[in-house]
Image (cartoon, helix red, strand yellow):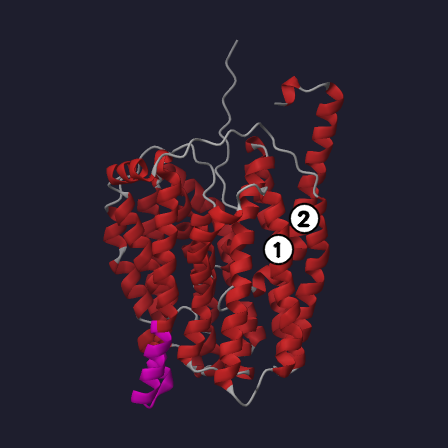
């Protein structure tokens, strides 16, 4: 496209691109606090629901299921609201709505009934559902917007650097939030300060989103959408997609059933502070971020499913150690969380690259929608089932720590048992689909549950391959 533009237009286009890239980085840095707070089972909301407004485990499971329910509804709502609207316009509009929901939470914390946990939990669930719907639409439309204006040759280098920079902002906010909550002894004021900081930082982020002078890097012609019957026919020809979806659903259930309660266990039963938990999360994120390039090379060299199975085993076998964690040996958590980050990053990255290969290009809308809907429904039901199981276990067994220990065996057992489904998948040659928007939403959300929060903000991309110069 640039080749047919006059020289002054090419210069203006290049200037706008450079400014947009800079704004994209600084916008991401200032957006990270509120994005981090929006994750299910993050340390701030876990402390709020477990310590300040104590919820029973069933109520807590319902609250943590809300983001996945929002992801499910997004499949049906997004095609309706995108008609006639640009991706940038949708991103800015729903980002503002998401920001307003967090502004509302600050005064809301002061008038919630602290002596009525059931009523407080109902208000939290309603608020979190609305906020998660805004967040889900914002995330998908933002990904679509990025593909429109970031040229393919720049994506790998640009998003790689942006991902690294954003980790610093995330880690500083996690550690700072944990320190403030611990220092102020989990008073309502402490949460209002933390949320207020995130809301304040989001203001320039929203301004830079709206001010970014992005231009499409090429003329977009929307590929024709086949009739639904034709898309189903192409999906049936893909023999590997059903076992992949089944594996994803089983993995989502395993990770999300008791995954949100690991932080609760550390805060309630191990008597750790939010700052302690923040250190564990930091170690996990650093381990994952540092190991991700090596996992990427292994995936390119040996294929996705074999590396994913190896990563899954390396990740889940040490998770059996949670069965032995008690207040007297919490030092082992430093090793466990670091290893979670290192070993789990390869599995999550492989999920993305394998999904790109399996989605039939002719039925990409239907395939992505089915995958997202199935996994979202399973992931939404899982924490409710897990919360009910913990609630029942506490009423049956006198030792609460033993109940947690038995519950934490589910994740590694189910995850390892699901590996044969993954091995049944046949990897075709990669399709031309370069980004999968909504389908990665659950992967990002689940990453926070299992200690890989840095992948929630990771921009997945397929770097362009350079064509070697021809010898003269």
| Front one among 268 and 225 | 225
293 to the left or right of 145: left
Q: Residue at position x 35%, y 50% from top?
A: 371
155 to the left or right of 330: right
Extreme residue in the right direction: 8
Q: Is residue 393 magenta?
A: yes
Q: Can you see residue 65? A: yes
Q: Which percent across, then down, holds residue 283?
A: 52, 63
Q: Which percent across, then down, holds residue 222?
A: 49, 32
Residue that carries the numbered disc 1 in the rendered image: 95
| Front one among 153 and 227 | 227
Q: Can you see residue 454? A: no
Q: Is residue 465 magenta?
A: no
Magenta range is 385-404
Q: Dot 1: few (<14), some (14–19), or many (≥20) neighbours within 10 Å?
A: many
Residue that carries the numbered disc 2 in the rendered image: 209
Q: Which percent across, then down, holds residue 7?
A: 73, 19
Circle 1: element type: helix
245 to the left or right of 41: left
| Front one among 294 and 251 | 251
From what the image shows, is residue 24 above or below residue 404?
above
User: In the rendered structure, which disc, 2 or 1, sits on the residue that comes first in sequence?
Assistant: 1
Q: Quadrant for residue 3, please give it.
A: top right
Q: Are marks 2 and 1 in contact (CB under 8 Å)?
A: yes
Q: Dot 2: few (<14), some (14–19), or many (≥20) neighbours within 10 Å?
A: many
Extreme residue in the top direction: 472
| Front one among 447 and 195 | 195
450 to the left or right of 272: left
């Amino acid at each position: 496209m640039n080749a047919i533009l006059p020289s002054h237009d090419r210069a203006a286009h290049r200037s706008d691109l450079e400014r947009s890239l800079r704004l994209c980085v600084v916008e991401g840095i200032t957006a990270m606090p509120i994005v981090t707070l929006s994750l299910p089972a993050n340390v701030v909301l876990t402390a709020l629901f477990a310590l300040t407004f104590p919820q029973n485990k069933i109520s807590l499971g319902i609250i943590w299921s809300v983001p996945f329910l929002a992801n499910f509804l997004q499949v049906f709502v997004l095609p309706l609201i995108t008609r006639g609207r640009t991706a940038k316009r949708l991103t800015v509009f729903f980002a503002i709505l998401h920001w307003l929901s967090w502004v509302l939470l600050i005064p809301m914390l002061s008038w919630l009934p602290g002596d009525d946990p059931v009523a407080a939990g109902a208000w939290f669930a309603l608020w979190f559902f609305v906020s998660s719907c805004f967040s889900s639409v914002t995330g998908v439309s933002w990904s679509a917007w990025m593909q429109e204006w970031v040229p393919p040759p720049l994506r790998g280098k640009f998003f790689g650097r942006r991902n690294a920079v954003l980790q610093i902002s995330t880690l500083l906010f996690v550690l700072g939030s944990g320190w403030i909550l611990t220092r102020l002894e989990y008073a309502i004021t402490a949460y209002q300060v933390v949320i207020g900081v995130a809301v304040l930082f989001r203001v320039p982020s929203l301004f830079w989103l709206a001010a970014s002078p992005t231009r499409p890097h090429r003329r977009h012609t929307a590929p024709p959408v086949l009739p639904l019957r034709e898309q189903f026919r192409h999906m049936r020809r893909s023999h590997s997609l059903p076992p992949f979806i089944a594996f994803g659903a089983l993995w989502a259930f395993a990770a999300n059933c008791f995954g949100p309660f690991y932080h609760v266990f550390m805060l309630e039963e191990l008597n750790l502070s939010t700052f302690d938990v923040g250190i564990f999360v930091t170690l996990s994120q650093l381990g994952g971020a540092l190991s991700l390039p090596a996992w990427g090379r292994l995936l390119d060299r040996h294929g996705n499913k074999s590396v994913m199975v190896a990563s899954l085993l390396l990740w889940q076998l040490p998770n059996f150690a949670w069965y032995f964690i008690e207040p007297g040996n919490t030092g082992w958590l430093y090793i466990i969380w670091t290893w979670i980050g290192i070993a789990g990053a390869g599995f999550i990255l492989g999920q993305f690259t394998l999904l790109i290969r399996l989605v039939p290009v002719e039925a990409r809308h239907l395939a992505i929608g089915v995958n997202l809907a199935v996994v979202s429904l399973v992931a939404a039901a899982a924490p409710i089932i897990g919360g009910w199981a913990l609630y029942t276990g506490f009423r049956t067994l006198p030792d609460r720590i033993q109940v947690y220990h038995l519950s934490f065996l589910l994740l590694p057992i189910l995850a390892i048992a699901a590996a044969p489904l993954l091995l049944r998948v046949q990897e075709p040659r990669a399709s031309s689909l370069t980004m999968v928007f909504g389908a990665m939403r659950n992967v990002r959300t689940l990453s926070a549950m299992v200690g890989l929060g840095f992948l929630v903000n990771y921009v997945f991309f397929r770097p362009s391959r350079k064509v070697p110069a021809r010898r003269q």
